[in-house]
C-alpha cells in the first residue's frame, strides 16, 4: 500500500483566513476576496504590522477551530481506502499549536489514528511516496514525490506537480 | 551526511525510574535495583495496580524533569559532528507529554533545533539510516537499520543489532 503524507495548514486547515480575521479584529482592515487570495498574508499588510501578525501564530487560540479547506474531508476519506495516510505538519515551530492541532484532527478526521500523526520541522525526515504540501521547501530533500497544493502564497512558485484543490488530488491519486 | 533518529524514553530520558518513584509515593513499595531493572515496570507490580500505573503517563507532570540516561548527552554531542541527528519519539499517544518533552530537549540538548524534533506514533514514517530505540516494534517496517537500546523491558527480546549503553553507541557509530 502506497503512503501519502498530508500537511495541515493551507492544505486541510485554513490558517490564512484566521490571519485575516484577527487582522480585521485588531486593525479594522478587511481585504477583498481576490486580493486576500493573491499572496501571502504577510505581503498584504504594511511592514510595521508584520511582527504583530507573526506573533498571532504563537497565540494559544490561533489554531483552534480553523476552517476546513474545501473537499479535504471527502477526498481524504476516499484516499484512506487505497493508501496509508499520515498527517505531517511542521508544528514544532509553534509549540502552542500542538494540542489544538490534535483536537482539530480528532474532530474532523476521527478515523486517522494517533499513530499516523506527525509533528515535525524538516520534512525530509518523512518516509512516504507522496507529500501534499503548500511549501516547496519541504520537497527539496523529500524521498518521494512532492505535490504542491496551491495556496495564496505559492501561486507564483515553480514546481513540476501542482494541484489547485482537493478535486485535483482525487483526479491525480484515485 | 548519514542520519540517526533517536528515541527519547528509556534511550535518552529515564521514564522507568519515574514510574518507580511515583509507585513508591502511592503504594510505599520500593524495588531493589536489580529487580527494578530486570523487566518492564508493569510486570513488577500486581495486576490490580496496573491501570493506575498506566495512567501515570497521562499525567501532566510525568514527563517533566526526567533523569538523563547516562552518557546520552556526551555521545550525542559527538555524533552531532558527523551525522544529522533527529529526535523521534512516539509521543502522540500521550498528548500531555508534548510540551514537557520540548522543554526537556531544550534544556538537555539545546543545540538540537526544533526542525529536528519529531513527535509521531508509527515510526515507519521516519526516513533515517539508523533508529536507536528500545522498542523493536518500530524496526519492523523501518527503512534503515534499527539499533536496539537495552532497557529493562527488552532484555530478552531478540534483535540483530543491540547496544547496552551510550558507550556502545559510540563504539558502533564513531
Image: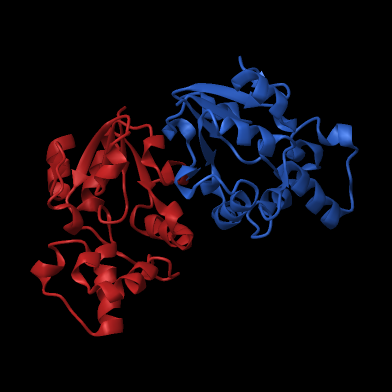
Chain colours: A blue, B red
Quadrant where the C terminus of chain B lies? top left
The image shows residue A172 at horizontal and vertical percentages of 63, 19
The residue shown at (29%, 69%) is: B18
Quadrant where the N terminus of chain B lies? top left
* Looking at the image, residue A136 lies above or below residue B14: above
Relative depth, front residue between B88 and A173? A173
The residue shown at (14%, 43%) is: B158
Relative depth, front residue between A124 and A105? A105
Asked if one can make out residue B70 in the rendered structure from this viewpoint, the answer is no
The image shows residue A141 at horizontal and vertical percentages of 46, 25
Asked if one can make out residue A9 in the rendered structure from this viewpoint, the answer is yes
The image shows residue A157 at horizontal and vertical percentages of 67, 21
- Tell me which corner region of the image, top left, top right, bottom left or bottom right, holds residue A174: top right
Q: Residue furthest top?
A: A160
User: What number of labels is visible?
Assistant: 0
Q: Residue furthest bottom?
A: B28
The residue shown at (71%, 31%) is: A151
The image shows residue A45 at horizontal and vertical percentages of 80, 42
- Tell me which corner region of the image, top left, top right, bottom left or bottom right, holds residue B17: bottom left
- Tell me which corner region of the image, top left, top right, bottom left or bottom right, holds residue A59: bottom right
Amino acid at each position: 500500500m502506497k503512503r501519502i503524507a498530508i500537511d495541515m495548514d493551507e492544505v486541510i486547515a485554513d490558517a490564512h483566513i484566521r490571519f485575516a480575521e484577527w487582522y480585521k479584529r485588531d486593525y479594522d482592515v478587511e481585504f477583498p476576496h481576490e486580493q486576500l487570495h493573491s499572496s501571502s498574508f504577510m505581503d498584504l499588510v504594511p511592514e510595521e504590522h508584520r511582527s504583530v501578525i507573526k506573533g498571532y501564530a504563537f497565540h494559544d487560540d490561533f489554531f483552534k477551530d480553523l476552517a476546513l479547506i474545501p473537499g479535504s474531508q471527502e477526498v481524504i476519506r476516499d484516499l484512506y481506502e487505497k493508501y496509508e495516510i499520515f498527517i505531517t505538519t511542521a508544528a514544532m515551530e509553534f509549540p502552542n499549536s500542538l494540542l489544538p492541532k490534535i483536537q482539530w484532527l480528532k474532530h474532523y478526521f476521527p478515523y486517522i489514528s494517533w499513530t499516523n500523526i506527525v509533528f515535525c520541522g524538516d520534512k525530509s525526515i518523512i518516509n512516504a511516496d507522496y507529500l501534499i504540501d503548500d511549501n516547496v521547501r519541504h520537497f527539496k530533500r523529500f524521498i518521494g514525490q512532492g505535490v504542491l497544493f496551491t495556496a495564496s502564497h505559492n501561486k507564483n512558485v515553480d514546481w513540476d506537480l501542482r494541484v489547485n484543490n482537493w478535486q485535483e488530488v482525487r483526479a491525480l491519486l484515485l
